[in-house]
Image (cartoon, helix red, strand yellow):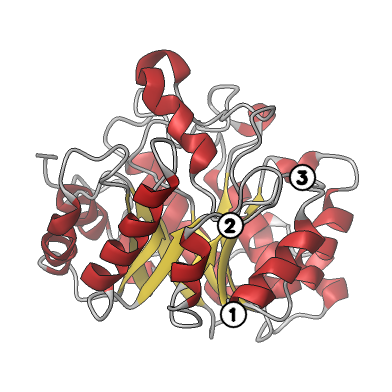
Amino acid sequence: MMEAAMIWNEPNNKSHWDPEIDPDWSLFAKMAILAGDGIAAADPSLTRVLGGISPIDPGFIRRMKDYGVLDHVDAVAVHGFPLDWNLWQIGEWPQRIEEIRSVTGLPIWVSEVGVSSFGAEEVQRWGLERTLALLTGGAERIQWYSLYDLPRAWEATTRHREAEGSSYYRHFYMGLLREDGSPKPAVEEFMRHTPEIGLVQWFHFEDPRLDDAVAWMKRLGVTYLRTGLSWADSFRPGALDWFDRQMAALEDFDVTVTFCFTPEHRGLAPHHTSAPIHPEEFAEFCARMTARYAPGARRSLAAADGYGSRSSMPAQPSRSSSQPGQPRP
């Protein structure tokens, strides 16, 4: 079942939010406040999580606090990959968590952490064991990225191949399972920590791996799952049928659904990282999906299909989301 809604993914990472369009994140803050209110209107019992930040930057969380965003979410999230991309060592994980705790008293979720097997599968296994030893007890939720390696035929479209060089290819080796579905050595270590540790698996539109993924997650003892529903995908023919199938397949898990990705025709620029022209439209998408899939939603399935009118959205909070924040360090 859907237990939490995450508002965007890595909003302080240019792979997911365009800083040239929104250099001070004021547009993101306005959108996040509206989304948080829309989710709460659809299901007040649902946990709202500010999208996991990467890099882990207390300055960004402080900015969101100053904009008022943290008044409209129930938890904040961080992402970290020190053995693959971050410019800090794996042993610094507790310090990174405490840097965020110094800014907010909200629960902190590590909603994406992982180690690639790009260099060696044994490194991934060691990295998983070491990461969990460092994070267990220090964060309210830990979710490992990911179940599957990214198929080489699927370009990592949110990344920058030219800028990242060989690091780009690490994205294709983050899974506990190889591209052909066979398990890596890290699987055995992962199973030692379930069900306390969760998993992250993004499913592409009409992803053929869905049923196999469900079978594997049950075999691994997973109960907590983070995945996504793409606002951009919602405009595809058959989108709602696919969303229904995906969420029905995952009904036995406690699912955090990440809402993200701007449709090209609804962005200030024609790209999924763009701030939307009308942030209310993203909030309406979040509210519709929450009303459709969250167990505590106050609206029936039929009402969920008609939720999208602007007049049904909650009033914008009195605190202005364009209030200047602290300068980013």
Q: Residue at x 21, y 50 (%)?
A: 63
Q: Residue at x 60, y 53 (%)?
A: 177
How far apart are the two marked residues, 2 and 3, measured between alpha carbons? Answer: 17 Å
In the image, residue 252 lies at what x, y percent? 71, 81
In the image, residue 208 lies at what x, y percent? 82, 49
The earlier-in-sequence mark between 2 and 3 is: 2
SS at circle 2: loop
Of residues 225 and 1, the one nearer the viewer is 225
The earlier-in-sequence mark between 2 and 1 is: 2
Residue 114 seen by the camera: no
Mark 1 closeness class: few <14, some 14–19, many ≥20 residues within 10 Å: some
Residue at which label 3 appears: 205
Residue 117 seen by the camera: yes
Of residues 42 and 189, the one nearer the viewer is 189
Residue type highlighted by circle 1: Gly
SS at circle 3: loop
78 lies left or right of 254: left
Of residues 194 and 41, the one nearer the viewer is 194
Which circle, 2 or 3, is nearer the viewer?
2
SS at circle 1: loop
Quarter of the figure with residue 153: top right
Residue type highlighted by circle 3: Phe
Quadrant where the C terminus lies? top left
139 lies left or right of 198: left
Dot label at residue 18: none
In the image, residue 184 lies at what x, y percent? 54, 54
Residue at which label 2 appears: 147
45 lies left or right of 84: right
Residue at which label 1 appears: 221
Residue type highlighted by circle 2: Leu
Tell me whether the residue at label 2 lies in contact with that at label 1, contact meaning CB atoms closer than 8 angstroms: no
